[in-house]
Amino acid sequence: MEFLTEYGLFLAKVITFVVAAVVVISMVVSATQKEKGEAEDDGELQVRKLNETYRKLKESIQSRLMSDQERKAWSKVKKKKDKLKKKAGKAKKAEGEGAGASPARIYVLDFDGDIKASDTEPLRRAVSAVLSVAEPGKDEVVIRLESGGGLVHSYGLAAAQLDRIRNKGIHLTACVDKVAASGGYMMACVADRIVASPFAILGSIGVVAQLPNFHRLLKKNSVDFEVLTAGEHKRTMTVFGENTDKGRQKFLEDLDDTHNLFKDYVSERRPNVDINAVATGDIWFGQRALEVNLIDEIKTSDEYLIEACDKADVVSVTFQRKKKLPEKLGLATSSALEHTVWKVLSAFRNQKIQ
C-alpha cells in the first residue's frame, strides 16, 4: 500500500512536470510565431479538381459491373483514350498559351455555418484566392452553403465576402442541400442564382433575441445588482438588473431596425421577392421556396456540379487552418469545449427552425 502511494505521488509529479514543460514550450513557440509575423500564414489553400473525382467514381462502378474479360478490354481502350486526351490537352494548352486563352472554370467554395459564422475566415481566404485568378464574364463561383443562421454582425461579414465576388462581375451560384435560414439566407441571397434540394429549409427572414433575467431571484435572496451607465441607451436590457418598460421598448425598436435592414438587404439582391410576404420569420421547404421566388431552381449540389463538369473545369478551393502546437498536444480543451457548445446551440436552433 505504501509503495502504491509513493508511486502515485511520483507519477503525479512526472505528469505535472510534463504538462508544465509542454505549456512553456507552447508559449515560447507562440511568441516566436508572433515575432515572425506568421498570422497570415497559419494555414494552406487546398485545390482539388472535381472533374477527376466524379470521373473516377463513374469508372469505378463501371469496372465493377464488368466481367474480367470485359474489364481488360475496357481498360486497354481507356488507357488509349487517356493517352490521346493527354496529348490533345498539351497541344491545346500550348495553343491556348500562345493565343492567351484558358478554359472556363467553376470554383467551388464551402461554408458550414454555426451561430458565430466561424467559417467566415476560411471563406475570406478562399474568396481572396479565387478572385486573384477568376475571369469576370467567363468563370463562375459556386458556394455550397449550409447554415441555420446566428449572430447578425458575424453573418453580415460572411455575406460581405460573397458580395466581393459579385462586385467583381463574377457569376455566383449558391447551392443549398439542407438549410440556409436567417443569416444563412442572408448569405444565399447574395448569389445571382440559388439552387436548393427539394426539402432544403430556406427563409426565416427575421430577428430574434432571448435574454434570461435573474432579478427576482437575486431580490428574493436580498442580493443587490447595480448597472451604472453613461448614455441613455447604453444598456436597455440586463440579465441581473431590473428591466423597465422603457428599456424593453428601445430594445424592440433596435430589433425592428435590424429586421428592416435585413429586409432591405434581401430586397436589393432578390428584387422579384415580395419581401413583406416572406419576411415574417417563416421558413419554406425547397419547392415552396421556389414558388415565392426565394430560390431559382430545385436541384442538389451534386447534380449541379456533375452537370457543370461537362462544360468547364470544376475546382474545389478550401482554406485549411494549421493546427497550433497547443492543439496538437491536446491542450486546447477550452477552445474545443467552446466549439462544442456553439455546435450544440446551432443544432438546437436548427431543430427550432424545423
Image (cartoon, rainbow, N blue to C red):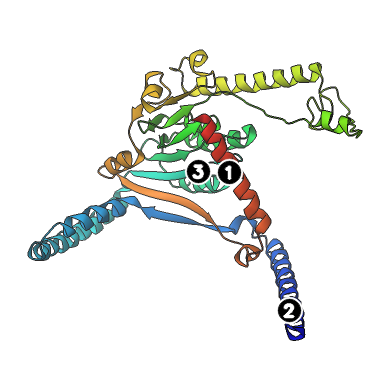
User: Height in image: 24 above or below 41?
Assistant: below
Helix or strand or loop: what does disc 1 sit on?
helix
Above or below — where is 163 with respect to 291? below
> Closer to the camera: disc 1 or disc 2?
2
Using the image as rendered, state which of residue 207 and residue 133 is in the foreground.
207
Residue at horizontal 80 percent and vertical 29 percent from the top: 238
Q: Which residue is mark 3?
A: 112
| Place of residue 4 in the rendered image (x, y in percent of width and height, measured from the top left) | 72, 82
Check the image and name the residue furthest to the front.
Answer: 1
Mark 3: secondary structure: strand
Amino acid type, residue under disc 2 in the picture: Gly
Q: Amino acid at mark 3?
A: Asp
Task: Using the numbered discs, state the Cα–Cα distance from disc 1 to disc 3 in whole angstroms.
Answer: 14 Å
At a point 73% along the width and 22% down the height, the residue shown is 251
Residue underneath mark 1: 344
Does the residue at mark 1 contact the one at mark 3 (Cβ under 8 Å)? no
The residue depicted at 50 percent of the width and 16 percent of the height is: 275
Q: Are marks 1 and 2 in contact (CB under 8 Å)?
A: no
Judging depth in this view, the residue of 268 and 154 nearest the camera is 154
Q: Residue tagged by mark 2?
A: 8
| Distance between the alpha carbons at the discs numbered 3 and 2 | 45 Å
Sequence-wise, the earlier of marks 1 and 3 is: 3
Task: Indicate the quadrant where residue 209 lies.
Answer: top right
Left or right of residue 329: residue 137:
left
Furthest residue in direction bottom, as rendered: 3
